[in-house]
């Protein structure tokens, strides 16, 4: 199994539970943190206390997944939250938006669920799209 290292020097496998998994209904592990940090670098998200603000450019980017700000107007549940990742020790995107984004990525075939596990497999299509859309080398 190929190894790489997180920002904190922790070895991270290119597959497996710590690499890519769900956390409740959103994306977690190395890939979940990388996705969130890439969205911040692209200025789609900005950290705000315990959550994230979605920028105008962020909503435009999310529209490719058929996600719009109006989809979330009627819910009391937080749109975003910073969820500290159990293995990476850095936040990944949680809340309604995190759940919806993962669902859309699953539908598009970027990830596949592993039966009887929270682990997700990054598909070849997912690797290509994560790189093209966010600069993530998955």
Image (spheres, rainbow, N blue to C red):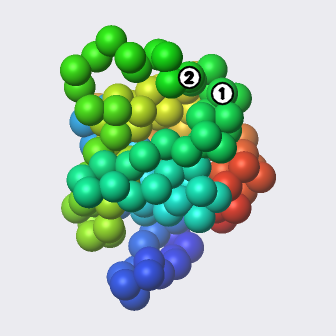
Mark toward the start of the polypeptide (2 vs 1): 1
Which residue appears at 39% of the width and 58% of the height?
47
Residue 13, horizontal then vertical, whole percent: 46, 69
Which residue appears at 59% of the width and 64% of the height?
41
Q: Is residue 114 left or right of residue 85?
A: right
Q: Nearer the viewer, residue 96 or 87?
A: 96
**Is disc 2 surrounded by few (<14), some (14 to 19) or many (20+) residues within 10 Å?**
some
**In the displayed structure, would residue 48 be above or below residue 88?**
above
Q: Are marks 2 and 1 in contact (CB under 8 Å)?
A: yes
Secondary element under disc 2, as helix, strand or loop, is loop
Q: Nearer the viewer, residue 129 or 133?
A: 133
**Is disc 1 surrounded by few (<14), some (14 to 19) or many (20+) residues within 10 Å?**
few
The answer to which quarter of the image holds residue 11 is bottom left
Q: Nearer the viewer, residue 85 or 115?
A: 85
**Quick one: quadrant of the C terminus?**
bottom right
**In the displayed structure, would residue 19 be above or below residue 6?**
above
Residue 75, horizontal then vertical, whole percent: 28, 16
The answer to which quarter of the image holds residue 67 is top right
Which residue appears at 70% of the width and 29% of the height?
64
Q: Is residue 53 left or right of residue 137?
A: left
Q: Residue furthest front?
A: 56
Secondary element under disc 1, as helix, strand or loop, is helix
Which residue appears at 49% of the width and 33% of the height?
101
Residue 81, horizontal then vertical, whole percent: 29, 45
Q: CA distance from mark 2 to mark 1?
A: 6 Å
The circle on residue 68 is 2
Q: Is residue 20 visible?
A: no
Q: Is residue 134 visible?
A: yes
**In the displayed structure, would residue 67 be above or below residue 117?**
above
Residue 9, horizontal then vertical, whole percent: 39, 87
Q: Residue furthest bottom?
A: 9
- According to the image, label 1 marks what residue? 63
């Amino acid at each position: 199994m190929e190894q790489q290292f997180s920002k904190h020097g922790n070895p991270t496998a290119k597959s497996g539970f710590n690499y890519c998994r769900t956390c409740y209904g959103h994306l977690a592990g190395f890939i979940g943190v990388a996705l969130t940090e890439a969205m911040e670098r692209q200025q789609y998200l900005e950290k705000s206390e315990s959550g994230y603000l979605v920028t105008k450019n962020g909503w435009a980017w999310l529209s490719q997944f058929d996600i719009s700000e109006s989809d979330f107007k009627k819910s009391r549940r937080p749109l975003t939250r910073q969820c500290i990742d159990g293995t990476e020790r850095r936040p990944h995107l949680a809340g309604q938006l995190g759940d919806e984004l993962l669902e859309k990525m699953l539908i598009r075939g970027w990830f596949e669920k592993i039966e009887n596990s929270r682990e997700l497999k990054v598909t070849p299509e997912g690797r290509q799209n994560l790189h093209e859309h966010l600069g993530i080398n998955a």
